[in-house]
Amino acid sequence: MIRQPNFVSTEFAEMAKEWAKKKKSNSHIQKLSFCKISDRKCIQMMHFGSYDNEQKSFAIMDDFARKNKLERKSMKHKEIYISDPRKVAPEKLKTVLRFEVNKLV
């Protein structure tokens, strides 16, 4: 998932896909989709470093949830990639990690 600014519309995203296809042939372009995700109660954190070390950040997030009487809705999570792994060393990658939570009763 890559967050887009509010001015990016579905039409704009489709135009960008067409432009990218003309510039360079890549079968993965057709698999791209553009959607809006509605706001939900979530915990999120900026993870710094390799994707292999994300578990440390998830442990911090789980601890925060426990201390605030929240529980994960499921084991699914979202990742928003801030850094380009082709241009940034693994130890300098930035990724937003997010999962939905429910309030414990």
Image (cartoon, rainbow, N blue to C red):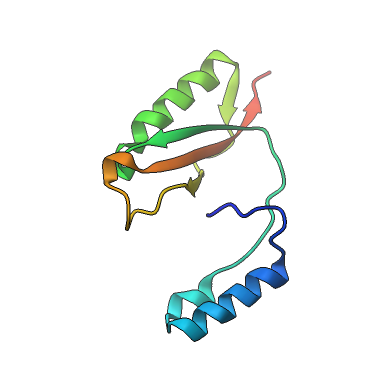
- Toward which corner of the image does residue 59 lie, by quadrant? top left
- Looking at the picture, tell me which residue is in the foreground, 61 or 92: 92
Question: Quadrant where the C terminus lies?
Answer: top right
- The x and y percentages for residue 86 are 32, 58
Question: On screen, 41 above or below 68?
Answer: below
- The x and y percentages for residue 77 are 51, 43
- Toward which corner of the image does residue 69 lie, by quadrant? top right
- The x and y percentages for residue 47 are 41, 35
Residue drawn at point x = 30 percent, y = 42 percent: 50
- The x and y percentages for residue 23 are 47, 82
Question: On screen, 95 above or below 71?
Answer: below
Question: On screen, 64 above or below 94?
Answer: above
How many tags in the picture?
0
Residue farthest along the top direction in this orientation: 67
Residue drawn at point x = 27 percent, y = 47 percent: 89
Residue drawn at point x = 49 percent, y = 75 percent: 29
Residue drawn at point x = 49 percent, y = 40 percent: 96
